[in-house]
Amino acid sequence: MVHKWNITIPELTGDEERRAYVYLPESYDMDESRHYPVLYMFDGHNVFFDEDATYGKCWGMKEYMDYTETEVIIAAVECNHSPDNGRLSEYSPFNFSDPKFGRFTGRGKITMDWMVHTFKKEIDSNFRTLPDRAHTYIAGSSMGGLMSLYAVLQYNRWFSRAAALSPSLWVAPGRLEYLINHARLGPNTIVYMDYGSQEIFFHANMEQQFAKVTSLLLRRRIFLESRIVPGGNHCEASWEKQIPFFMNTLLYEP
């Protein structure tokens, strides 16, 4: 079951509405004493429904969760669709310049502050969650993948596990490397990170940057699954195929 409603993020877009989504496991209404882990996801409009997805193809998370009977709540929020690249700004933790996109002011910290101090509180208040760090995860792709890495590093007090699919590691790589090296990490931090073999050369030096980020995460003793996906590309259809891999990592119990 997926609930959908409109919200505002005053800190980012004032009174402009965007959609929020919450997936509840099929068992949710059967046992009112049960509480669930929560997976937060970026680009919520692409997560559940083809009719809401930017390019007409979603991740198919509802179908996967129902079919596998995975006992996790998913909370997701639509991105900023502003034609002046509002999504890039909201989903970048850092200021950056790019020959294709120009110069951007990263508002990722504002996005994450809202997520942990407003949205997470709303989800925990209205649904039977396990609100502690150990049961709170985050995932996204592309710029959302970069934000997932940022969240599990900078906001490790709230998130213990992250899945970063095709993360935009080309955005301010030096700033990301500094964050990995200096982030205050709690125990049992887990990261899933992948990149498609068909997209690895979309940006200069991405192969080397992916390897470097992998190495730095391992040096911080983060439990890491890092993959180059054979034939993988930069699209929802490809990311959908990775769901079993990243969900297995997020939910792995030693």
Image (cartoon, grey):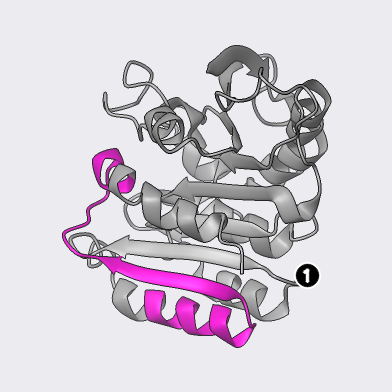
Residue 48 on the magenta segment: no
Q: How many marks?
A: 1
Classify residue 252 by image quadrant.
bottom right
Disc 1 secondary structure class: loop
Classify residue 76 by image quadrant.
top right
Specify few, some or many for label 1: CA neighbours under 10 Å numbering under 14, 14-19, or 20 or more: some
Q: Nearer the viewer, residue 34 or 41?
A: 34
Residue 72 picture location, percent across and down: 60, 38
Q: Is residue 39 above or below residue 197?
A: above
Q: Nearer the viewer, residue 148 or 39?
A: 39
- In the image, what residue occupies the spot 56% across and 14% down? 4
- In the image, what residue occupies the spot 78% across and 70% down? 186
Residue 235 on the magenta segment: yes
- In the image, what residue occupies the spot 75% across and 71% down? 185
Q: Amino acid at mark 1?
A: Gly
Tell me the quarter of the image containing the C terminus: bottom right
Tell whether 105 sits left or right of 155: left
Tell whether 240 sits left or right of 165: left
Residue stretch rendered in magenta on the structure: 210-239
Tell whether 133 sits left or right of 61: right
Is residue 94 shown to the viewer in this render?
Answer: no
Residue on which disc 1 sits: 186
Q: Nearer the viewer, residue 89 or 125?
A: 125
- In the image, what residue occupies the spot 57% across and 28% down? 25
Residue 199 picture location, percent across and down: 23, 60
Q: Is residue 56 above or below residue 252?
A: above
Residue 89 picture location, percent across and down: 54, 43
Is residue 193 shown to the viewer in this render?
Answer: yes
Q: Is residue 130 above or below residue 178?
A: above
Residue 88 picture location, percent across and down: 48, 43
